Image (tube, helix red, strand yellow):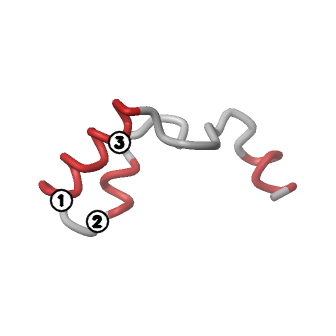
Amino acid sequence: TRWINYLRPDIKRGKFSSQEERTNIQLHALLGNRWSAIAAHLPKR
């Protein structure tokens, strides 16, 4: 994890907020298992 902290120090860790959870569920219903496309809609994750 040391290199992740160095490369992306602004990355948000921990549990998803309720808004992020809803966004994740909605995007998964729309995009399926295209996780890189879903991740593009979740800033700093």
Type of amino acid at the residue the image marks with label 1:
Leu
Residue assigned mark 2? 34
Would you say the residues marked 1 and 2 are in contact, meaning their CB atoms lie under 8 Å apart? yes
Specify the farthest residue to the right. 2
Query: Distance from label 3 to label 1 (Cα)?
Result: 15 Å
Residue assigned mark 1? 31
Determine the residue positioned at 80% across, 46% down. Answer: 5
Estimate the x, y position of residue 11 in percent, counting from the top left: 64, 39
Above or below residue 34? Residue 11 is: above
Q: Earlier in the sequence, mark 2 or mark 3?
A: 3
Residue assigned mark 3? 21
Q: Secondary structure at mark 2?
A: loop
Query: Distance from label 1 to label 2 (Cα)?
Result: 6 Å
Near-viewer residue (31 or 6): 31
Within-10-Å neighbours for mark 3: few <14, some 14–19, many 20+: few
- The mark closer to the camera, 2 or 3, is 3
Specify the farthest residue to the left. 30
Estimate the x, y position of residue 30 in percent, counting from the top left: 12, 54
Q: Secondary structure at mark 1?
A: helix
Within-10-Å neighbours for mark 2: few <14, some 14–19, many 20+: few
Estimate the x, y position of residue 25 in percent, counting from the top left: 25, 50
Type of amino acid at the residue the image marks with label 3:
Glu
Specify the farthest residue to the bottom. 33
Above or below residue 19? Residue 14 is: below
Residue 3 located left or right of residue 27: right
Would you say the residues marked 2 and 3 are in contact, meaning their CB atoms lie under 8 Å apart? no
Above or below residue 42? Residue 39 is: below
- The mark closer to the camera, 3 or 1, is 3
- Quarter of the view holding residue 1: bottom right
